[in-house]
Amino acid sequence: MTSNDHTPTEPDLSGNGRFERGQLPNPPEDLLVAVGRLLHLTPDEYTTMWLHARGHRPTRPMTPEVGMAVPATWQAACDGQRHMMYVTDMAWRVVAYNRPFAALFRNGQVPENTARWMLLADEAKTTLMDWENTWAPSVAGQLRNAFAEHPDNRDLAQLDREVRADPIAGPIYAHGADASIAPDGVDRHLQHPLWGVGLAKMVAANLFAAPGARVIIVVFEPQEQDD
């Protein structure tokens, strides 16, 4: 077992009848995870079980794969959006995007993983203005928080290793000054390869069907530059 493998030991379910009859107040988290796996609950069913059993949403994912399966219909949603829009799974792998978003990248080549691109790609350091002070600390904070919440996710673990090893992004990531969870409502400057300098107004949301996956819309407002 590696240091990043936090898969819980399955609890003893021999007394599970009390839970099924509603006679087990505040059931252990391990029990709820095990019941979810045993019954192959959907994300909605799993969340509902937690709400009724403990009074809050899940603090533990049912499986390490949660948040990695994004419904394909999100591509149609992206196609219908005039602003830059993309959807990633829990580990920032791009699963859907539209043409305005593709135009942000050199030759229209959307990166496989937006967190890896934002933190490690040379192109990002030019496109994302004031990268070192605004963009990078925020993305690093989001990655740290996601990995802390899902330490058994292999893709997040790989990202964590790559960023820590990078001579530029690594110190920003290790410093941990930014406590970002998501970029919702954030405005940052952007050097768009086609539209020039402008303000990127970020709109972010999570997916119910894939907890931890995210939808990002970027509303771009061009700004005139001083001579």
Image (spheres, rainbow, N blue to C red):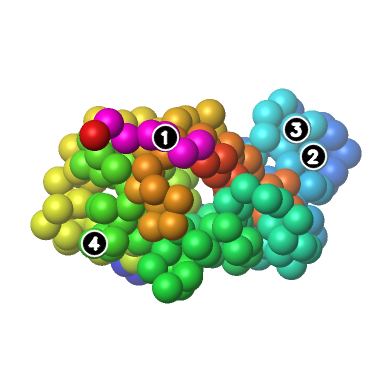
Question: What mark, if any, has residue 51 been given in the picture?
Answer: 3
**Whether residue 1 is situated above or below residue 168 in the rendered picture:** below
54 vs 48, nearest the viewer: 48
Mark 3: few, some, or many residues within 10 Å (few <14, many ≥20)?
few
Question: What mark, if any, has residue 122 been given in the picture?
Answer: 4
Whether the residues at callouts 1 and 2 have beta carbons within 8 Å, the answer is no
Whether the residues at callouts 3 and 2 have beta carbons within 8 Å, the answer is yes
**Which amino acid type corresponds to the residue marked 3 in the rendered image?**
Leu
> Measured from the top left, where is residue 104 in percent x and y?
45, 58
> Measured from the top left, where is residue 140 in percent x and y?
32, 45
**Which amino acid type corresponds to the residue marked 2 in the rendered image?**
Thr
Alpha carbon distance from label 1 to label 2: 46 Å
Residue at 67% across, 35% down: 57
**Which amino acid type corresponds to the residue marked 1 in the rendered image?**
Gln
Alpha carbon distance from label 2 to label 4: 44 Å
Residue on which the image places disc 2 = 48
Residue at 68% across, 29% down: 56
Mark 1: few, some, or many residues within 10 Å (few <14, many ≥20)?
few
Residue at 17% across, 61% down: 165
180 vs 101, nearest the viewer: 101
Magenta highlight range = 221-226
**Whether residue 67 is situated above or below residue 176 in the rendered picture:** below
Alpha carbon distance from label 3 to label 1: 46 Å
Alpha carbon distance from label 4 to label 1: 24 Å
* Secondary structure mostly seen in the magenta stretch: loop
Residue 185 visible in the shown view: yes
**Mark 4 secondary-structure assignment:** helix
Left or right: 94 as drawn, with respect to 191: right
31 vs 214, nearest the viewer: 214
Residue on which the image places disc 1 = 223
N-terminal of the two: label 4 or label 3? 3
